[in-house]
Image (tube, grey):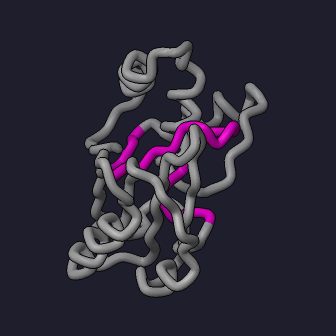
Amino acid sequence: MCGIIGIIGNREVAPMLMDGLKRLEYRGYDSAGIALQENGGLTIHKKQGRISVMEETLPKLKATVGIGHTRWATHGEPSDANAHPQVDSSGDIAVIHNGTLENYADLRSRMEAASIEFNSGTDTEVLPHLIARHYDGDLLAAVRAALGEVTGAYAIV
């Protein structure tokens, strides 16, 4: 079962995210990942396998905002590419998702027809692409608009 964590703080969040992910290990997972907002951009670090494997290669980052995920594959095999977070084409929007997006195949087909490239086999990856399509400077409005297009049961960060 997947687990998600998000932190907005005033000190380095990577160690807190890793601690939170370790606390979720009992739920079972096949991959783990984090996204950190640092210096106006995103750093994504994700790996198939145990959290300890990801932690061994985690660079030292000073981010105070981040999200983390443990994934149990439902769409797409366990792999580094299918681990969360998933990002849009620009790498500016990262999403972690638990649940299922029932209409992801239709949404993905429409976006691929519009030349949007996908890098994973997950249903989650449609979300950052949808958000990016609606983004005009107001992230909350873009998220709301994107979620208005999906059906299913889910939680996101």
Q: Position of residue 59 (x, y in %)?
A: 57, 71
Q: Confirm whether the magenta stretch covers residue 148.
A: no
Image side of residue 4 versus residue 129, left or right: left
Span of residues in magenta: 81-102
Q: Nearer the viewer, residue 101 or 50?
A: 50
Asked if the stretch drawn in magenta spans residue 94, the answer is yes
**Residue 156 vertical placement versus 147 (above, below):** below
Residue 22 relative to residue 129: left or right:
left
The C terminus lies in quadrant: top left
Front residue of 59/114: it is 59
Residue found 51% across the figure and 28% down from its top:
131
Please tell me which residue lies in front, 23 or 74. Answer: 23
Q: On the picture, is 112 further left or further right than 127?
A: right
Q: Quadrant of the N terminus?
A: bottom left
From the top left corner, tell me how far across and down residue 18 is, in percent: 35, 72
Residue at horizontal 21%, vertical 81%?
26
Tell me which corner region of the image, top left, top right, bottom left or bottom right, holds residue 22.
bottom left
x%, y% of residue 62?
A: 48, 58
